[in-house]
Amino acid sequence: MFTKNYEFRYSDLDKNRNIKLSILVDILQDISIFHSHVVGLDLETLHTDSLAWLLEGWRIRFEKPFDPYKTAVAKTGIMKLGRCDAVRKYEVFQENELKIKATAVWYTVNMDKRKIVRVPEGVADYYDSVSEEDNNLPYIKLKPDNEAVLMGTTKVEQRDIDTNNHMNNVKSLEAALEFLPEDLDVSELKIKYLKELRKGEIISVYKSEKENGFYFDLRNENGDICVIVNIEKE
């Protein structure tokens, strides 16, 4: 699998000197994009053809806590390259000890039409492997929860926008995390992205508490659910 090292910074720590949940998800997002860049499918190449890899969602299992003073070694590879999508696996280690195991689904999108399209012919040739061994952590598509209640609102600011001109995946997660109880030990995180959120939009954050954790959804001004987050606690 493709490998990249990460060092944690002071700003990556919470008040208990633990790595912030959003930082760990950001590592997975970063190695996905960097992998494509290294094999030749960089942002400039994709944008020339009006293409982008857009994330459908995550399933992330947190195996053990991180040591903020040790290097994290992240790995990713493609388990399946479909007609319009790629299913990626991830592992993050510290000193050869598995800390994170994850699966994600990425779609190829025509950014002019904002529409899912076929994976371009020959894309598989860019990667060392599109048949990595299955990680036995299947991606799960989340469904809305009618019991969720409004917790608050936030506005999509310029700082939240990424190269695809919408709210970055990690930033939308952070909007939900604002309403997560402090000092919660998270065992698994699932996210599904349904609609883009643009600069200036007002987001409403809905939440419901479950026996094993919490459900969140982010809705736009039309009431459409744009992001679903499920957090399981230990």
Image (cartoon, rainbow, N blue to C red):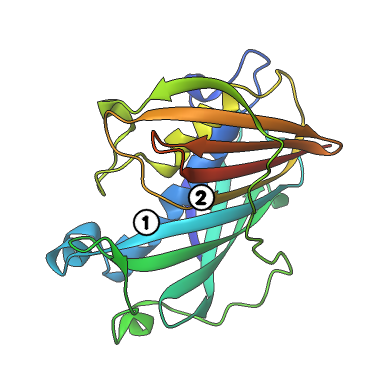
The residue where tag 1 is placed is: 33
Residue type of the residue flagged with mark 1: Ile
Q: Secondary structure at mark 2?
A: helix
Is residue 10 in view from this perspective? yes
Hey, which residue is sitting farthest left in the picture? 48
How far apart are the alpha carbons under marks 2 and 1?
A: 9 Å
Percent position (x, y) of residue 55? Answer: 44, 57
Looking at this view, is 48 or 141 the one in front? 141
Residue type of the residue flagged with mark 2: Leu
Query: Dot 1: within a 10 Å radius of its alpha carbon, few (fewer than 14), some, or many (20 or more) residues?
Result: some
Q: Secondary structure at mark 1?
A: helix
Query: Dot 2: within a 10 Å radius of its alpha carbon, few (fewer than 14), some, or many (20 or more) residues?
Result: many
The residue where tag 2 is placed is: 28
Horizontally, residue 15 falls left or right of residue 45, namely right
Percent position (x, y) of residue 83? Answer: 42, 83
Q: In the image, is residue 181 above or below residue 224?
A: above
Horizontally, residue 218 falls left or right of residue 182, namely left
Q: In the image, is residue 109 above or below residue 202?
A: below
